[in-house]
Image (cartoon, rainbow, N blue to C red):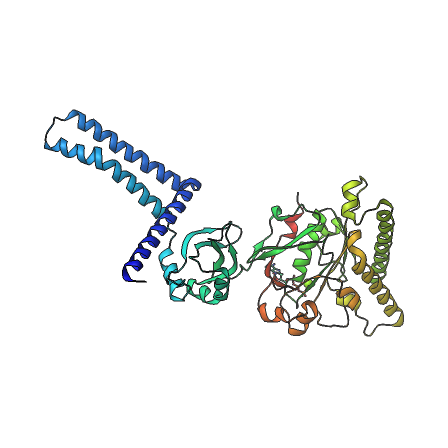
């Protein structure tokens, strides 16, 4: 390529950039109130000046000034006014810091064969709930795979964490979802009533960099929560139970600390079990109910309670059994023969629910802090597909998640910070137990 070709290419690129900026500017003006006010004000002022100049031109006698007037205001002014408007649109269409972002990308070598870096077209917030900024680029021919390969370098160059890359609606746009490199997740995020899902039967856990963490019990029926003492298990467990109650499930809570962890409000809305014999009775009833539902669904030809409830008026409620310190309940060490037998029976009932509960709408939410692999038997644990762990040591993390990520990624001093078995870190929502049940 000779110098002249290169010059022509550069001019074309510059022209293309201005055109893209102009397009963005038009988009901003037609979508954002502030910019539309600026644009309308500009047009009105320009028209006003134009009208005044016409009035003046008509009243004055013909002399050298009026000739000047005619040339400047009647011929050149409209041109200037339009050019000014275009320049203003281009300025509006140029995101803040665009130049330095483009230069920084160029410095780390994110360039095409003509040594052009991508052009930042727009930068905007996704919504107010999450501090995610989306950067929209014209990639200048640099494929998505190359962006992904250079993720770390891009993050350093722009001082952001990249949550995800996305190809825009056309191949000619790449979107970067970013959060500021200076901030992590906020330490406390309060539950808001509007978060409650009206889907059958989605529960919300908390806030992650990529949005809310939730699961649908109709698909993934049981939940296991782990974390060492003070990590925030009980708060998270209550958050989930509270949603179950609001979604009109029948809730049973085993709490062998005598139910003191639960304020009177909870005792009104759920059935709290405080000792082993009652626990076995309740679990036996739940298993009977499971068998009963099995018969009914078979009779009506429905695969699960979701299908059944859609068709038949006599709805089946979902049933949730929650237990805060399940290892405490299932630990057999040092027990008498009779007591051991009781625990074995409890274990047996829990296994049945773990294995078969999904279709019949009977769910387990279990929490534990004990890093003891023998206590949660395979039957129970292996049927719990959604597992989250807060601050923990390697052993506990391994038991809950099958990996050591909770030990690696959740800082020792954190409260309410958890990681899911598939690696999503989130801050559980905090809620006021006294306020939340007041309608
Ligand atoms: N989501 C959260 N956001 C902010 N702070 C939290 C959150 N969850 C818990 N905390 C704080 O951490 C404290 C301990 O939480 P919690 O009682 O749930 O811990 P735990 O894991 O159940 O502990 P233990 O095993 O001793 O029962 C709470 O009193 C609260 O101050
Ligand atoms: Mg607790």
Find residue 340 and report its horizontal and vertical position in percent. Answer: 86, 70
Q: Residue at x 76, y 47 (%)?
A: 306
Q: Is residue 136 visible?
A: yes
Residue at the extreme right of the image, as rendered: 338
Find residue 216 and report its horizontal and vertical position in percent. Answer: 69, 53
Q: Is residue 351 above or below residue 71?
A: below
Ligand 1's image quarter is bottom right
Asked where in the image residue 256 lies, by quadrant, the reply is bottom right
Q: Is residue 429 visible?
A: no
Residue at the extreme left of the image, as rendered: 63
Q: Nearer the viewer, residue 335 or 205?
A: 205
Asked where in the image residue 72 lies, by quadrant, the reply is top left
Q: Nearer the viewer, residue 139 or 10?
A: 10
Q: Residue at x 33, y 50 (%)?
A: 15
Q: Residue at x 29, y 58 (%)?
A: 7
In the rendered image, the quadrant that contains the C terminus is: top right
13 horizontally vs 251: left or right: left
Q: Nearer the viewer, residue 167 or 335?
A: 167
Q: Residue at x 36, y 59 (%)?
A: 100
Residue at the extreme front of the image, as rendered: 1
Find residue 431 and report its horizontal and vertical position in percent. Answer: 62, 53
Q: Is residue 28 above or below residue 167?
A: above
73 horizontally vs 308: left or right: left
* Number of marks drawn: 0
Find residue 432 and report its horizontal and vertical position in percent. Answer: 62, 52
In the rendered image, the quadrant that contains the N terminus is: bottom left
354 horizontally vs 171: left or right: right
């Amino acid at each position: 390529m000779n110098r002249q070709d290169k010059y022509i290419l550069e001019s074309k690129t510059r022209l293309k950039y201005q055109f893209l900026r102009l397009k963005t500017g038009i988009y901003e003006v037609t979508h954002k109130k502030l910019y539309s006010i600026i644009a309308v004000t500009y047009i009105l002022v320009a028209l006003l000046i134009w009208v005044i100049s016409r009035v003046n031109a008509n009243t004055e006698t013909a002399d050298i000034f009026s000739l000047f007037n005619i040339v400047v205001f009647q011929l050149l002014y409209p041109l200037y006014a339009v050019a000014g408007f275009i320049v203003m649109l281009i300025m509006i269409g140029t995101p803040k810091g665009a130049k330095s972002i483009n230069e920084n990308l160029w410095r780390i070598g994110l360039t095409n064969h003509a040594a052009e870096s991508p052009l930042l077209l727009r930068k905007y917030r996704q919504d107010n709930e999450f501090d995610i900024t989306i950067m929209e680029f014209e990639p200048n021919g640099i494929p998505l795979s190359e962006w992904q390969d250079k993720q770390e370098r891009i993050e350093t160059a722009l001082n952001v964490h990249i949550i995800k890359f996305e190809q825009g609606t056309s191949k000619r746009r790449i979107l970067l979802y970013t959060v500021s490199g200076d901030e992590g997740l906020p330490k406390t995020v309060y539950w808001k009533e509007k978060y409650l899902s009206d889907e059958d039967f989605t529960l919300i856990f908390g806030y992650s960099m990529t949005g809310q963490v939730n699961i649908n019990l109709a698909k993934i029926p049981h939940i296991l929560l782990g974390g060492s003492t003070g990590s925030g298990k009980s708060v998270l467990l209550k958050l989930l139970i509270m949603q179950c109650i609001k979604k009109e499930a029948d809730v049973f809570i085993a709490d062998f600390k005598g139910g003191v962890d639960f304020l009177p409000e909870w005792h009104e809305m759920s059935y709290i079990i405080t000792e082993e014999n009652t626990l076995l009775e309740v679990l036996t009833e739940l298993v009977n109910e499971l068998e009963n539902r099995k018969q009914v669904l078979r009779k009506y030809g429905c695969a699960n309670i979701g299908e059944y409830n859609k068709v038949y008026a006599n709805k089946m409620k979902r049933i949730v059994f929650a237990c805060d310190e399940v290892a405490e309940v299932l630990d057999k060490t040092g027990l008498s023969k009779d007591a051991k037998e009781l625990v074995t029976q409890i274990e047996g009932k829990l296994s049945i629910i773990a294995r078969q509960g999904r279709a019949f709408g009977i769910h387990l939410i279990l929490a534990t802090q004990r890093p003891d692999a023998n206590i949660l038997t395979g039957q129970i644990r292996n049927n719990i597909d959604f597992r989250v762990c807060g601050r923990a040591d390697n052993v506990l993390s391994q038991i809950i998640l099958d990996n050591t990520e909770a030990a690696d990624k959740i800082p020792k001093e954190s409260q309410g910070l958890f990681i899911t078995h598939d690696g999503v870190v989130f801050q559980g929502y905090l809620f006021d137990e006294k306020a939340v049940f007041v309608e």
